[in-house]
Amino acid sequence: MVSLVLVSHSQKLAESVAEVALLMAGSAKIKAIGGNDDGGYGASEKKITAAVEEMYSDDGVIVIADIGSSVNTAKAVIKKMADEGKRVYLADCPMIEGSIAAAVISSINMPLEEVLRQAQDSKNMKKA
């Protein structure tokens, strides 16, 4: 099963998004990461790397980040892991909608490419 790593500037925000995604897809593998190394707001390469390594399997990992430095830090981690031959991708999607879509599709054991596509397609969801 494809794993998800949710990255935010806030640990509470990442955990809340994971909680909602797991309500929809209880069997999904999700790790929520937020904040800097000191526990404040920000992004931590160390935390993201540890989370991706913890969640990694041959099925791959999709990282979903909120904004700014979370995205940039996740990209740096993903590049290093790709250089090691690992299947880790950053989804270009809104954090909440993308996390839920990815969790649902992952929970039914769809391949990484489909989980990534569903997460990224969530940015086109109409709300009105």
Image (cartoon, rainbow, N blue to C red):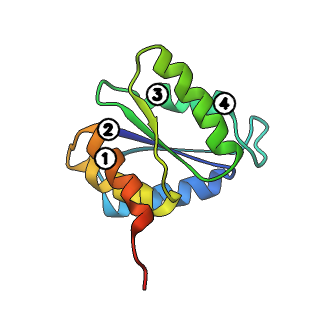
Estimate the spatial distance between the alpha carbons at disc 4 and disc 1, rounded to whole Å. Answer: 24 Å
Quadrant of the image for the C terminus?
Answer: bottom left
Q: Which of marks 4 and 1 is nearer the N terminus?
A: 4
Q: What residue type is labelled 4?
A: Glu
In the picture, measured across the screen, residue 95 lies left or right of residue 62, that is right
Q: Earlier in the sequence, mark 2 or mark 3?
A: 2
- In terms of secondary structure, where does tag 4 sit? helix
Give the labeled residue for mark 4: 45
* Front disc: 4 or 1: 1
Give the labeled residue for mark 2: 2
Q: Which amino acid does label 3 sit on?
A: Glu
**Tag 2–tag 3 contact (CB < 8 Å):** no
105 to 128, vertically: above or below: above
In the picture, measured across the screen, residue 87 lies left or right of residue 65, that is left
In percent of the image, x 63 and y 32: which residue is there? Answer: 47
Give the labeled residue for mark 3: 54
Give the labeled residue for mark 1: 115
* Front disc: 2 or 3: 2
In percent of the image, x 46 and y 46: which residue is there? Answer: 91
Q: Residue furthest bottom?
A: 128
Q: Which amino acid does label 2 sit on?
A: Val
In the picture, measured across the screen, residue 20 lies left or right of residue 38, that is left
